[in-house]
Image (cartoon, rainbow, N blue to C red):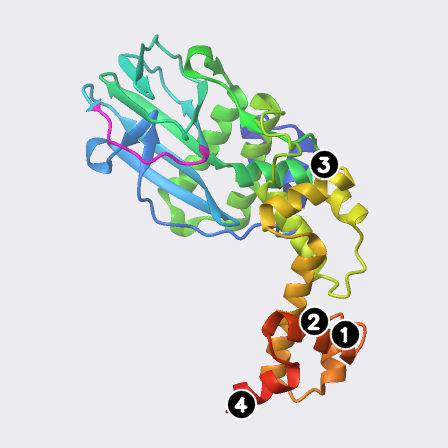
Amino acid sequence: MSIIEQSGVDGALWTSALAMAARGRSGFTLLEARESVLIAQSLSCRVDVHKTLAVRTGDDEFVVAHISRAAEGHGMTEPQPKRAVYTACVHLSEFSGYDVWCDERVSTGCGLPAGSIHINDMRHSWYADIQGRFDVVNFCIPQSALDEVIEDQSSTRIDELRCPMSEARIDTIAMNLARALIPALMRPNEVNRLFVDHAWRAVTAHLARTYGYGGRRVLSGQSGLAPWQERRAKEMLLADLSGSVSIADLSSACRLSCSHFSQAFRQTVGCPPHQWLLTQRVERSKQLLLNTDQPLSEIALVTGFADQSHFTRVFSQRVRVSPGVWRREQAR
């Protein structure tokens, strides 16, 4: 049986996940487990099963963890750092007998049946006193993973995943996706990496579609670019050092108006797009001056300047010496 049949993910969603993986937007790495989160953090010595895999998504990690304990009496969980991730907890068995603290506010939990899911915002402080048995698979999802999946689906931006424990619900798709990934967690050396890359995208897409909310971080005149918007804009600028890409092109790629994009770029990067591009041109020209024998006129054209005079003027303003002098000084 395929993972699609096991999970109940619809064909369109899975096809989208496959297409995104084929474009190679994220690097994928299996990483050694360092911690697990069950409402709050637990150590491997206090549980029966403690298996994790991590997928590198840009500078972040999407982590899948399977944690279980057959005996009662786990007790208080461990302190943990606050992080800009969401943890979707999928309970594979009934979960009861616990008290949970979020930012020092306590709530006594009611029993959660098998198949229940809740999502914790890990920017808050979480810890728990767990007396009952548990068997849970967690998906730890950074905002960058949400951005990438939503961007590739051309969907409305998701700024928040919301399903608190007080509103936990049965989610058969999430439970079956979790179960489908357990063999990979148990035998990571046998994992087909393409399979896992497809799977995390399908998980993220399902959670975004089912529990995603927009608007909390919609850009205003006082807000900078989201990480995915900054990456997209810089990639487009670097792809053509001549600067032929327009503000309209950049703002459209970031799904903003032209004026909104210009404000947001400046706040995030510290200068307007054309100034940032000039800096990149100068840095690229330094590499060519150091590592090639190309004449200044050729370097000027390769790095997007109109001519050698333009190159010399901008370089001298920013480096305080002319390109020719800088090259000779570096050769000493």
Whether 134 is drawn above or below 225: the answer is above
Kindly check if marks 1 and 4 are in contact, taking CB atoms under 8 A apart as contact: no
Q: Amino acid at mark 1?
A: His
Q: Nearer the viewer, residue 265 or 227?
A: 265
**Real-space Cα distance between discs 4 and 3?**
50 Å
Mark 1: few/some/many CA within 10 Å (<14, 14-19, 20+): some
Residue 178 makes an appearance in the image: yes
**Real-space Cα distance between discs 1 and 4?**
24 Å
Tag 3, which secondary structure?
A: loop
List the residue tagged with mark 2. Answer: 314
User: In the visual, does 50 lie left or right of 302?
Assistant: left
Kindly check if marks 1 and 2 are in contact, taking CB atoms under 8 A apart as contact: yes
Mark found first going from the N terminus, 4 or 2: 2
Mark 4: few/some/many CA within 10 Å (<14, 14-19, 20+): few
Mark 2: few/some/many CA within 10 Å (<14, 14-19, 20+): some
Mark 4 vs mark 2: give the one in front.
2
List the residue tagged with mark 4. Answer: 331
Residue 33 inside the magenta-drawn segment: no
